[in-house]
Amino acid sequence: MKTKAVIVLGLLLMSECAYAAPFCAVYSSGRRCWYYSMESCQQANPGDCVINEGEMHGPVGTAPFCVVSSYAARCYYYSAQSCRDAAARDGGACVYNR
């Protein structure tokens, strides 16, 4: 019975990782990476949402600000305001390009 429980638990953890979304709600019990827009993450958890860096593909562009959305990290923005505006339109988040 214990072996079956361990296998089921392992499958559940693997399935959560396999379908991880680009945005995660952060709780005291851990991260839930189930959200495909920053807005939906913030609705679920107004306290803290972060970008799931494990799901992000390499950024495109070299500008100092990037919009991270469900499909890409686009670093095309030279001002924080233009980045925030684009992020709001795309349901993403504006981040500084490291």
Image (cartoon, grey):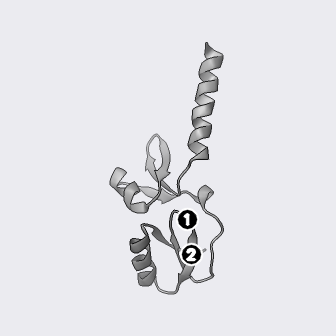
Q: Secondary structure at mark 1?
A: loop
User: Residue at 63% across / 82% down in the picture?
Assistant: 62
Q: Is residue 37 above or below residue 94?
A: above
Q: Is residue 29 above or below residue 9?
A: below
Q: Position of residue 25 (x, y in %)?
A: 44, 51
Q: Quadrant of residue 52?
A: bottom right
Label 2 Cα neighbours within 10 Å, binned few <14 / some 14-19 / many ≥20? many
User: Residue at 63% across / 76% down in the picture?
Assistant: 60
Determine which residue is flagged by label 1.
71
Name the kind of residue labelled 1 in the image.
Tyr
User: Residue at 43% across / 56% down in the picture?
Assistant: 49
Q: Position of residue 94 (x, y in %)?
A: 47, 72
Q: Secondary structure at mark 2?
A: strand
Residue 74's label in the rendered image is 2
Q: Position of residue 73 (x, y in %)?
A: 57, 70
Name the kind of residue labelled 2 in the image.
Arg
Left/right of residue 76 with respect to residue 90 in the rendered view: right
Name of the residue lying farthest toward the top? 1
Seen from the viewer's position, the closer of residues 73 and 46 is 73
